[in-house]
């Protein structure tokens, strides 16, 4: 993975800020296209060290049907309890979504169980994340825009491009 940013001196600070916000939050907004019409839904997520996001979802949902037609997606992650006028933080991203399979699916399943241990009331082993009704989707981000006024000051946002 190669990360490209305008200001190379801030690269490590930007990465640290993104990881902090990904850890702090648990829900994302996923935006897809439904016949050229925007559609958004909310999902719990996990992430890996390459800023791939993973969601576990029912394959009959509209967002899954949209991904099957056009796998380009946008995401948004933020703490909805932030108060207007305070130092705000959030992440926006663009990428592609695909169904996880094989060893990658098992790896994502174990990460999901670690972050959300109560999921074990619904499933008994990692392979049950992928069945006829549900799948783990990988969201491979190409671009991340982080808005972090606590780290970068008023209206402080930074962008990175991720090349894999």
Image (spheres, rainbow, N blue to C red):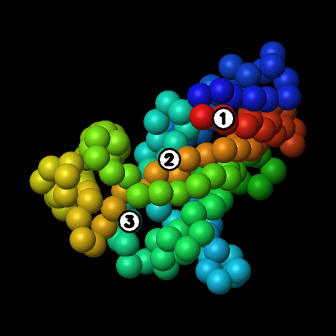
| Circle 2 Cα neighbour tier, 10 Å, few/some/many (<14 / 14–19 / ≥20) | many
Q: Please name the residue that numbered disc 3 is placed on.
A: 57
- Looking at the picture, how far across and down is residue 109, in whole percent? 29, 47
Q: Which residue lies furthest to the left in this view?
A: 124
Q: Which of 114 and 162 is in front in this view?
A: 162
Query: Upstream in the sequence, badge 1 or badge 2?
Result: 2
Q: Please name the residue that numbered disc 1 is placed on.
A: 163
- Circles 3 and 2, Cβ within 8 Å, touching? The answer is no
| Circle 1 Cα neighbour tier, 10 Å, few/some/many (<14 / 14–19 / ≥20) | few
Query: Upstream in the sequence, badge 1 or badge 3?
Result: 3
Marks 3 and 2 sit apart, C-alpha to C-alpha, by 13 Å
Q: How many badges with numbers are in the image?
A: 3
Q: Nearer the viewer, residue 3 or 23?
A: 3
Q: Please name the residue that numbered disc 2 is placed on.
A: 53
* Secondary structure found at label 1: strand
* Nearest to viewer (mark 1 / mark 2): 1
**Above or below: residue 46 compared with residue 18:** below
Occupied quadrant, residue 35: bottom right
* Residue 76 in sight: no
- Quadrant of the drawing holding the N terminus: top right
| Circle 3 Cα neighbour tier, 10 Å, few/some/many (<14 / 14–19 / ≥20) | some
């Amino acid at each position: 993975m190669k990360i490209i940013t305008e200001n190379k001196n801030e690269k490590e600070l930007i990465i640290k800020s993104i990881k902090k916000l990904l850890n702090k939050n648990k829900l994302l907004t996923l935006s897809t296209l439904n016949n050229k019409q925007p559609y958004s839904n909310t999902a719990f997520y996990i992430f890996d060290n390459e800023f791939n996001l993973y969601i576990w979802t029912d394959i009959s949902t509209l967002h899954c049907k949209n991904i099957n037609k056009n796998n380009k997606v946008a995401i948004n992650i933020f703490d909805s309890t932030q108060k207007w006028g305070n130092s705000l933080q959030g992440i926006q991203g663009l990428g592609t979504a695909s169904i996880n399979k094989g060893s990658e699916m098992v790896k994502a399943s174990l990460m999901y169980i670690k972050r959300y241990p109560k999921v074990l009331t619904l499933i008994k082993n990692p392979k049950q994340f992928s069945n006829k009704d549900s799948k783990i989707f990988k969201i491979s981000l190409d671009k991340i825009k982080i808005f972090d006024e606590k780290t970068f000051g008023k209206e402080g946002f930074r962008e990175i491009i991720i090349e894999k």
